[in-house]
């Protein structure tokens, strides 16, 4: 007990090691801290990889078809459902999802915890129509290839002998 | 005047009661670390109590499992007015990775009003301190409203 | 001469106490109580005895300074004491009978529900 | 009329209610700050006890179904009143208690017991199982510190009785104070030094400060005795706890450091307050910072062997006339 | 002296005995007549004792009554006498008040039982014998009364034959108690053989002339242990516990409040009046030592108990230990403290036994582990119990505090004035015992009256007024004797103590003036010790009241006044639907099975002393032979030591 008493006495005259935090700015988080998700819809390719790897299924994709045939794709990240594992960011090939170092996720409303972003996916151009001749030509090509393959197969045993 | 004094003290001495509703202990440890020298919540009068009867702020962590559901409800009923509920971490608000499990009966909103939520798995102690600070303001407002 | 009586009463008391302490049968314990009583009675009677005294039966007119008789008080005491002893024995025996009905035994080592 | 007014002043203002509450809040605030500093924390504001008290007053009071309502509400008030009554008997300033001749050390000993008993009865009346455990611990703590306390009091009484100052009263605080005025403070009496140390150990357990707060172990048995208390009754209990710090330190001051008088009341009061503050630091803050909470049987053994041994040594030394 | 008053002692005794007789005659058929007879007898005895207060206690006269007019002839007491001095009357008052309360209580308490005629007959005989004992002036009469007392007490203990252990307790009481009776008888025989008289006054006059006569010293040892048995002193305490626990509560009151007082009375008479040897250090050590040991051992034994009344029984012996301890100090202060505590013990222990009886009457159980939460169902009984518990634990301002305070002072001052460390340690033991008593009663109140109410006691109701009334009488006495100790001191204790001190008056009023002087008895055997310190509870109470008012005002100011939500909220116990808000907090669990058993409450304390407690548990084996052995060994040792030392 005596050493503790000594320690207590010396501590009494030292500066407290307490952070000042609620007064003033929040301190910087540690390097590579995984905090609030940021989502950049502009580079997203809508691959859906993030949704596949997300264990708590915190993201939600809304697909809304616009009048002109384009799709408005909205990704919603519910931070109150996220485990901040960073898997989505790792798997995102275009780095559209990143985890920032903002940890101050405090709020009174559900909206405070929603990270969302949307982009328009252009409808692809209409496909060209094939004529019957073209189809017949393609079929013939396929037949020829097949025959060639069969011939090659027949020659093989000979080569072995 | 006396009532005003009480209102002001309400924000200066909030006592916390912590309910673990099936949490993995991550948030619980972080909550305790709020009282450590580094974050020292006691300078705002925070104090962990052992009983809901003396609590002003009820901090709930963990998804609401079937086992803890009734206990949680009982504890929440036993807290004297006015009080504030804080949901700590992602689990109580959504169920987190346990979402959809057969043994989860959440989220917390289903059983009580949640005044302040902290997201994170787990939240940093600074975030918890900020949430508690917000909770004290709400506590004061609640008391004022009740008085009217 | 009275020394024999004193030794006898002492022996009776010790024997009775031995019975009460060492015997585990309740009836024997009560016999021990009786023996202690008898010893005490013998002692009292012996205390009042004067060698050569007559029985202390007189009318007031006959009583003179020269009368020599054994002390009547111890005899009265002994009579009272014997009566009380008989009552006690009867009482304890009735208790023993009921105990036997309730506990099914007379062994003191088994009649110990009130302990600790 | 004037006498009545003076008595009201005694009860409500100076050695009584107001001063006690003030000192209690001051000492508890200082204690909490010191403990925080020793743990390298900032610590709560000085008036934290006052805020706690006010806050509890503003809360709802839930009387549990199993509680006995009358006892539940009466216990804290009676306990607090008993404590204030002790304050009126202490000759803190100028060697004159507010109500002299009505009490002595044994009465104070029993009033302190009454304070604990009120807490115990209140806890019992609240009907909580945790309170049941808490009150049993409170009781064991009481058994623990009572023996050394009694031995200390006996030693002091012996010293003041055998002195040839012509004092017929043995257990009287007034007499002890007068003895010290003539012969110097009792702590300077070397055979009483072990007793003084023993009393220093008794103080934190009597108050229920941290290493000895087995009855109110908040994490272990959910606040123990106070488990079912909420609202104003809880506030009064918290206040009782704080005022008890003041009363115990003041009692030490009277018993061992009494008789110091400069003749100027203000200076005396300042000296007295300083001594109380110092004693609070030594007996409550230091063990709080340096020790973890004891177990029930450890408290019991510690007090009945070590502390009681110290007090007994003192008593024997005094007995031998040393 | 009014010659009419002269007859009151014998009339009081005979009222009870004749009442017993008449009860058995008329009560067989008519319950009302029986109750009337009982009520008249006990009230009559009480009234006669009260009538004697004026001449005996206040005027200091001594009533000497010779049965059949056989006054002493030529300095020899040949008749049987009743001699009532202030000491006898003090005990007589205690006895009659207790008898009165117990009798009234029995009317309702015993209404579940049959063959009540036997009960009341035995009860009145018991009362009569006890009264006869304390008023008697004749040693052999004391023996006869002791025997009647033991006999009826045993019969009453076994009255509820079907009750678990009743027969067993009664038999143990009878067997081991017979040791005490026998040793009284032997003592009487020895005294008679040397002095040829049985009159107390004459013995008191003659014994100092005997000097170192071995036979009278042996008689002293026998008589001391005989009365000690009746007071259930240390090695005899197990039989008290056995008998109290199983007897009906009204009889437990008699056994603890009255029978033990007979032992105390006997010891006071023996060491102060007959032998006047209390100032011999050895006798003082002997009496004080026995008292201190029984005081401490019994209070620790109480920690082990699971039965409400058995626990009370151990406390009873512990409190009698206090009385014997201070009686052994041999100072006026000690004696008055002892008498005060003896009186208070009858009052508060009677109250506690009656509350235990009320609990048993309403619930049918006395088990500390299964009872609980009765404060909701029996609030008035709870209040009465708390008053009794506070008194026995010596909390101010109840009577236990006033008498214990005197006890500490007496022991401490004796130690200081004699320069004897032994008495200081006795004072310390007394204080520690007081704290342990408190702890024990905390255990009872927590496990019987507070805590959770078990399901099977939902329908329990408060006891009827007829049972509460006697309890209130005792409770009021508790408060009154605690609040006005000066009054008690002046009008009861001082006369009794000065009666003990004024030996010549006692001898002369029986044997004729000048008898004491002729045998060289002049001075009292008491050393006067000044009473130090003032305990003035009334001013203290006023102070407490003032402070409570102050606190209440502040509390009122602090509480919000016009808001329903922030008010006190509570729920009626009778409400059908459960509301979790008002359940006890039990970590969120349902608090149904969360009752803390009475026997587990002090495990922390018991754990520290586990060796002592397990030894004590084994030592109280419950076997009659063992208890007899302890008694025989104690008697033999005391006899041996007395003969050697004195």
Image (cartoon, rainbow, N blue to C red):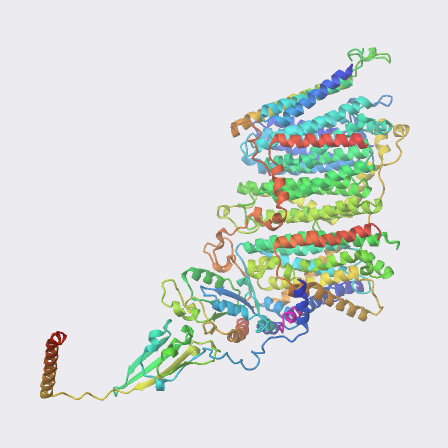
Q: Residue furthest front?
A: A161
Give the total number of marks visible in the rendering. Answer: 0
Q: Which percent across, then down, holds residue A17? A: 61, 75
Q: Which percent across, then down, holds residue A157? A: 12, 74
Residue A79 horizontal side relative to residue B53, left or right: left
Residue E629 horizontal side relative to residue E569, left or right: right
Magenta stretch encompasses residue D208: no
Within the image, what quadrant is residue E280 found in?
Answer: top right
Within the image, what quadrant is residue B39 found in?
Answer: bottom right
Magenta stretch encompasses residue D35: yes
Q: Which percent across, then down, holds residue A9? A: 68, 69
Within the image, what quadrant is residue C21 found in?
Answer: top right
Residue D214 in the image: above or below residue D22: above
Does residue E342 appear in this view? no
Residue C46 in the image: above or below residue B51: above
Residue E352 in the image: above or below residue E179: below
Nearest the viewer among D187 and E246 is D187
Q: Quadrant of the C terminus of chain E?
A: top right
Nearest the viewer among E71 and E595 is E595
Does residue E119 appear in this view? yes
Residue D159 horizontal side relative to residue A21, left or right: right
Q: Which percent across, then down, holds residue A99? A: 43, 80
Q: Quadrant of the N terminus of chain E?
A: top right
Nearest the viewer among A126 and E480 is A126
Residue E540 in the image: above or below residue E410: below
Q: Which residues are magenta?
A: D33-43
């Amino acid at each position: 007990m005596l050493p503790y008493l000594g320690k207590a006495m010396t501590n009494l005259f030292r500066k407290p090691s307490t952070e000042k935090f609620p007064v003033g700015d929040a301190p910087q988080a540690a390097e590579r801290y995984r905090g609030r998700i940021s989502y950049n819809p502009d580079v997203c390719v809508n691959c859906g990889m993030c949704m596949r790897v997300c264990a708590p299924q915190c993201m939600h994709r809304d697909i809304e078809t616009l009048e002109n045939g384009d799709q408005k794709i909205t990704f919603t990240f519910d931070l109150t459902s996220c485990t901040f594992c960073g898997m989505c960011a790792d798997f995102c090939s275009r780095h559209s999802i990143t985890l920032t170092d903002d940890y101050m996720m405090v709020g009174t409303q559900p909206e405070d915890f929603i990270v969302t972003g949307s982009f328009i996916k252009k409808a692809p151009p209409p496909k060209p129509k094939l004529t019957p001749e073209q189809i017949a030509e393609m079929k013939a090509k396929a037949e020829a290839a097949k025959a060639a393959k069969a011939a090659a197969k027949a020659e093989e045993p000979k080569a072995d002998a | 005047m006396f009532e005003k004094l009480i209102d002001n003290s309400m924000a200066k001495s909030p006592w916390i009661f912590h309910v673990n509703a099936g949490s993995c202990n991550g948030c619980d440890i972080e909550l305790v670390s709020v009282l450590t020298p580094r974050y020292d919540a006691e300078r705002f009068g925070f104090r962990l109590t052992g009983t809901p009867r003396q609590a002003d702020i009820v901090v709930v962590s963990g998804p609401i499992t079937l086992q803890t559901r009734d206990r949680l409800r009982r504890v929440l009923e036993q807290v004297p007015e006015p009080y504030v509920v804080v949901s700590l971490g992602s689990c109580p608000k959504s169920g987190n990775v346990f979402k959809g499990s057969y043994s989860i009966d959440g989220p917390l909103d289903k059983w009580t009003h949640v005044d302040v939520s902290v997201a994170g798995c787990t939240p940093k102690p600074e975030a918890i301190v900020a949430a508690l600070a917000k909770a004290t303001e709400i506590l004061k407002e609640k008391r004022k409203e009740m008085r009217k | 001469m009275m020394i024999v009586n004193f030794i006898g009463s002492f022996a009776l008391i010790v024997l009775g106490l031995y019975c009460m302490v060492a015997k585990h049968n309740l009836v024997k314990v009560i016999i021990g109580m009786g023996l202690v009583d008898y010893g005490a009675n013998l002692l009292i009677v012996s205390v009042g005895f004067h060698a050569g005294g007559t029985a202390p039966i007189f009318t007031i007119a006959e009583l003179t300074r020269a009368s020599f008789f054994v002390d009547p008080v111890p005899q009265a005491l002994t009579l009272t004491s014997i009566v009380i002893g008989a009552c006690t024995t009867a009482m304890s025996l009735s208790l023993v009978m009921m105990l036997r009905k309730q506990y099914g035994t007379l062994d003191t080592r088994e009649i110990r529900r009130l302990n600790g | 009329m004037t006498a009545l007014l003076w008595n009201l002043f005694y009860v409500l203002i100076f050695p009584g209610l107001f001063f006690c509450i003030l000192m209690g809040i001051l000492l508890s605030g200082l204690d909490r700050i010191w403990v925080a500093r020793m743990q390298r924390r900032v610590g709560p504001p000085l008036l934290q006890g006052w805020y706690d008290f006010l806050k509890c007053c503003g809360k709802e009071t839930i009387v549990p179904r199993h509680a006995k309502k009358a006892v539940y509400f009466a216990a804290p008030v009676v306990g607090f009143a008993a404590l204030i009554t002790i304050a009126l008997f202490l000759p803190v300033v100028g060697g004159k208690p507010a109500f002299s001749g009505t009490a002595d050390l044994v009465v104070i000993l029993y009033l302190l017991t009454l304070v604990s008993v009120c807490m115990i009865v209140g806890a019992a009346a609240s009907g909580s199982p945790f309170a049941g455990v808490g009150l049993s611990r409170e009781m064991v703590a009481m058994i623990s510190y009572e023996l050394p306390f009694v031995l200390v009091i006996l030693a002091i009484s012996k010293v003041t009785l055998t002195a040839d100052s012509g004092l017929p009263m043995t257990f009287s605080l007034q007499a002890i104070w007068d003895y010290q005025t003539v012969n110097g403070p009792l702590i300077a009496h070397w055979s009483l030094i072990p007793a003084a140390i023993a009393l220093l150990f008794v103080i934190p357990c009597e108050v229920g400060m941290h290493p000895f707060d087995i009855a109110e172990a908040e994490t272990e048995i959910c606040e123990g005795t106070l488990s079912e208390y909420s609202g104003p009754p809880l506030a009064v209990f918290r206040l009782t706890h704080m005022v008890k710090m003041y009363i115990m330190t003041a009692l030490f001051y009277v018993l061992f450091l009494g008789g110091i008088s400069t003749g100027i009341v203000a200076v005396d009061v300042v000296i007295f307050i300083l001594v109380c503050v110092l004693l609070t630091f030594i007996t409550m803050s230091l063990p709080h910072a340096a020790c973890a909470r004891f177990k029930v049987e450890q408290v019991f053994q510690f007090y009945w062997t070590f502390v009681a041994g110290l007090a007994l040594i003192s008593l024997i030394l005094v007995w031998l006339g040393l | 002296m009014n010659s009419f008053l002269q007859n009151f002692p014998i009339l009081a005794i005979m009222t009870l005995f004749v009442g017993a007789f008449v009860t058995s005659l008329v009560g067989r058929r008519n319950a009302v007549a029986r109750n009337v007879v009982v009520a008249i007898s006990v009230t009559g005895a009480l009234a006669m004792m009260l009538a004697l207060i004026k001449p005996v206690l206040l005027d200091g006269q001594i009533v000497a009554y010779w049965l059949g007019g056989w006054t002493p002839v030529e300095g020899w007491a040949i008749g049987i006498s009743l001699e009532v001095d202030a000491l006898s009357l003090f005990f007589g008052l205690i006895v009659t008040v207790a008898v009165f309360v117990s009798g009234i209580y029995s009317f309702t308490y015993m209404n579940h039982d049959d063959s009540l005629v036997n009960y009341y007959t035995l009860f009145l005989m018991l009362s009569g014998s006890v009264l006869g004992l304390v008023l008697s002036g004749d040693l052999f009469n004391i023996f006869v009364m002791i025997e009647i007392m033991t006999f009826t007490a045993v019969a009453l203990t076994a009255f509820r034959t079907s009750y678990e252990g009743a027969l067993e307790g009664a038999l143990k009481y009878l067997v081991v108690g017979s040791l005490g009776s026998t040793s009284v008888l032997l003592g009487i025989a020895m005294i008679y053989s040397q002095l040829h008289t049985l009159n107390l006054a004459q013995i008191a006059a003659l014994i100092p002339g005997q000097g170192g006569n071995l036979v009278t010293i042996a008689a002293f040892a026998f008589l001391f242990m005989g009365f000690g048995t009746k007071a259930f002193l240390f090695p005899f305490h197990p039989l008290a516990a056995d008998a109290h626990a199983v007897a009906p509560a009204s009889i437990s009151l008699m056994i603890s409040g009255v029978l033990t007082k007979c032992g105390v009375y006997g010891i006071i008479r023996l060491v102060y009046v007959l032998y006047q040897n209390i100032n011999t250090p050895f006798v003082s050590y002997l009496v004080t030592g026995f008292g201190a040991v029984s005081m401490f051992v019994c209070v620790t034994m109480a920690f082990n108990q699971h039965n409400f009344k058995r626990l009370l029984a151990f406390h009873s012996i512990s409190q009698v230990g206090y009385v014997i301890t201070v009686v052994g100090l041999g100072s006026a202060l000690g004696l008055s403290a002892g008498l005060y505590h003896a009186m208070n013990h009858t009052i508060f222990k009677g109250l506690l036994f009656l509350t235990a009886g009320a609990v048993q009457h309403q619930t049918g159980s006395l088990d500390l582990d299964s009872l609980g939460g009765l404060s909701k169902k029996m609030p008035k009984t709870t209040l009465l119990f708390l008053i009794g518990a506070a008194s026995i634990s010596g909390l101010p301002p109840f009577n236990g505090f006033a008498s214990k305070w005197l006890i500490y002072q007496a022991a401490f001052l004796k130690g200081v004035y004699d320069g004897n460390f032994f008495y200081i340690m006795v004072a310390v033991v007394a204080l520690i015992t007081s704290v342990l008593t408190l702890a024990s009663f905390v255990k009872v109140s927590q496990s019987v009256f507070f805590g959770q109410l078990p399901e099977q006691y939902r329908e329990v109701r408060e006891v009827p007024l007829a049972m509460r009334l006697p309890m209130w009488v005792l409770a009021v006495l508790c408060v009154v004797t605690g609040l006005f100790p000066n009054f008690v001191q002046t009008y009861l204790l001082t006369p009794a103590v000065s009666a003990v001190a004024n030996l010549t008056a006692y001898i002369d009023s029986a044997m004729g003036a000048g008898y004491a002087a002729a045998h060289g008895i002049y001075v009292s055997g008491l050393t006067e010790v000044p009473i130090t310190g003032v305990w003035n509870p009334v001013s203290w109470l006023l102070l407490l009241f003032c402070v409570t008012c102050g606190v209440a005002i502040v509390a009122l100011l602090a509480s919000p006044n016009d808001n329903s939500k922030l008010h006190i909220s509570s729920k009626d116990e009778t409400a059908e639907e459960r509301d979790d808000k008002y359940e006890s907090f039990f970590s969120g669990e349902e608090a149904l099975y969360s009752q803390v058993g009475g026997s587990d409450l002090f495990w922390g304390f018991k754990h520290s002393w586990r060796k002592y407690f397990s030894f004590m548990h084994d030592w109280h084996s419950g076997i009659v032979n063992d208890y007899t052995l302890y008694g025989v060994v104690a008697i033999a040792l005391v006899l041996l030591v007395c003969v050697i030392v004195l």
